Structures are given as structure tokens and as C-alpha cells.
Image: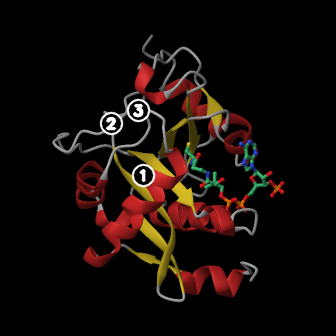
């Protein structure tokens, strides 16, 4: 089945309590054997921090993907596997994790989840940040994210991790203004 605009919209919805076992299973499958696996409690804490910026891809009643994002100060990032991170009041929205089930990849679902994220971010946030892991920086660059290679990341994010951000399209913050506002990444 292909994504398609109408299909994407219908299948991407807010997270329900009953989704967390499915989310944790997808996470384990996506990052098996790496230090990126956090487990259900840590994932759920990120979802609780910002329910209106977290989504699942629901295909025929099964959680086939998810996206978790939460307000977090620019150039900082949540600790992996931690379930007691403090809440932050920030105009930066951090995309903490996105996973699409292996058998559903390459059909536009990832892009659909990102489109939903952008729509949710637009009224309240100026920027979206993320840590690109596992060599995915080119995937994010294709979606308009730019790398901040001076931002140091802990080993737990893996060897090729890169901090990246984008000005929320339509928020009134231009990419050039972003450079002015954040001239000095932490290093
Ligand atoms: C990243 C992910 C969410 C994308 O989901 P998806 O549903 O396949 O995304 P889409 O179908 O919208 O887009 C697929 C595109 O991404 C590209 N892509 C996938 N993996 C990539 C990679 N490692 N590097 C560069 N591009 C990549 C595909 O080539 C495809 O490009 P095309 O549209 O030009 O053909 C999915 O691959 C995934 O769950 N990966 C494992 C978890 C993960 O690494 N998450 C990101 C953490 S930063």
C-alpha cells in the first residue's frame, strides 16, 4: 500500500496509552544491538513531555511507525534511556526519534510523519532540531536540515551522529535568521 496524501493523513494520529508496547517493539527492532535502544520507559517519558508533538503511523490498527518530539533548548538533546529528563520551555522542538517499520519503509511514511511534525510545530516553535544517527544525515539534508558539526554528541548516539536543525517552514524564521540567532554552537 502506498502513502498518498489522503492515506498519510488518515493513518498518522496522536499517541494513545495502548500504543507504547508497539512503539517500544519498533524501537528495539530498529536499533537492535546498538546503544541507541532506550526502552519503553524512556520513550514514554518523552511522549508524556509533549503529547501534541508525538505521533504514530497506524496501519490497520497496528503501530507501524512513530515520531516523538519535545521542546528542548537549541544545541542540546535529551539523554538516551533517561526517563527523568526535566521539561523545557523552548521555541525549539527536538525530534527525538522517528521509526517506520522495516516492511513499510520507502513508501513515504517517514516524509508523512515529518509533514505532520512541521504542521504541529508551526504555531509554537521557530526551529526543529534532531540528532541524525547511523549515517542518516543525507536523509535529513534532503528534508532541509542543516548540520551543526561543532555540536558534540555523546558516544551513546553512535559514531556518525550529527546535530542538525531547520527553521520551521512558515513560522516566520528564515534559515539565514537562524544563523544569526544561533551563531555559536556549543562545542
Ligand atoms: C528514516 C526512516 C524513518 C525513513 O522512513 P521511510 O518511511 O522509509 O521514509 P520515506 O519513505 O518518506 O523516505 C524514504 C527516502 O529516504 C531515503 N533514505 C532512507 N534511508 C536513508 C539513509 N540511511 N540515508 C539517506 N537516505 C535514506 C530513501 O532512499 C528514500 O529516498 P527517496 O524518497 O528519494 O527514494 C526509516 O528508514 C527508519 O525507520 N529508519 C530506522 C530508524 C532511524 O534511523 N531513524 C532516524 C533516526 S535519526
SS class, disc 3: loop
Let me know if residue 63 appears in the view: yes
Q: Alpha-carbon distance for marks 1 and 2?
A: 18 Å
Image quadrant in which you'd find residue 170:
bottom right
SS class, disc 1: loop
Give whichever of discs 1 and 2 has the lower sequence position: 2
The tally of labels here is 3
Task: Look at mark 1 in the image and give the residue it sits on.
Answer: 125
Say if 60 sits above or below 31 in the image: below
Q: Which mark is residue 78?
A: 2
Say if 27 sits above or below 183 in the image: below
Q: Residue at x 54, y 68 (%)?
A: 116
Q: Which mark is residue 169?
A: none
Q: Residue at x 61, y 24 (%)?
A: 160
For marks 1 and 2, give the one nearer the viewer.
2
SS class, disc 2: loop
Q: Residues within 10 Å of mark 1 (few under 14, many from 20)?
A: some
Q: Alpha-carbon distance for marks 3 and 2?
A: 11 Å
Image quadrant in which you'd find residue 13:
bottom left
Query: Viewed as shown, does residue 8 lie left or right of 84?
Result: right
Task: Look at mark 3 in the image and give the residue it sits on.
Answer: 74
Say if 185 sits above or below 94 in the image: above
Q: Residue at x 59, y 18 (%)?
A: 149
Q: Residue at x 67, y 67 (%)?
A: 103
Q: Residues within 10 Å of mark 3 (few under 14, many from 20)?
A: many
Amino acid at each position: 500500500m502506498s502513502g498518498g496524501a489522503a492515506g498519510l493523513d488518515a493513518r498518522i494520529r496522536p499517541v494513545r496509552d495502548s500504543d507504547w508496547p508497539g512503539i517500544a517493539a519498533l524501537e528495539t527492532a530498529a536499533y537492535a544491538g546498538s546503544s541507541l535502544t532506550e526502552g519503553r520507559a524512556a520513550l514514554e517519558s518523552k511522549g508524556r513531555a509533549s503529547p501534541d508533538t508525538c505521533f504514530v503511523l497506524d496501519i490497520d490498527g497496528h503501530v507501524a511507525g512513530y515520531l516523538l518530539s519535545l521542546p528542548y533548548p537549541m544545541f542540546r538533546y535529551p539523554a538516551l534511556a533517561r526517563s527523568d529528563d526535566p521539561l523545557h520551555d523552548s521555541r525549539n522542538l527536538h525530534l527525538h526519534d522517528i521509526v517506520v517499520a522495516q516492511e513499510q519503509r520507502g513508501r513515504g511514511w517517514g516524509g508523512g510523519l515529518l509533514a505532520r511534525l512541521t504542521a504541529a510545530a508551526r504555531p509554537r516553535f521557530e526551529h526543529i532540531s534532531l540528532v541524525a544517527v547511523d549515517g542518516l544525515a543525507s536523509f535529513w539534508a534532503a528534508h532541509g536540515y542543516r548540520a551543526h558539526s561543532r555540536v558534540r554528541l555523546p558516544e551513546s548516539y553512535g559514531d556518525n551522529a550529527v546535530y542538525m536543525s531547520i527553521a520551521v517552514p512558515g513560522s516566520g524564521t528564515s534559515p539565514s535568521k537562524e544563523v544569526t540567532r544561533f551563531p555559536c554552537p556549543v562545542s
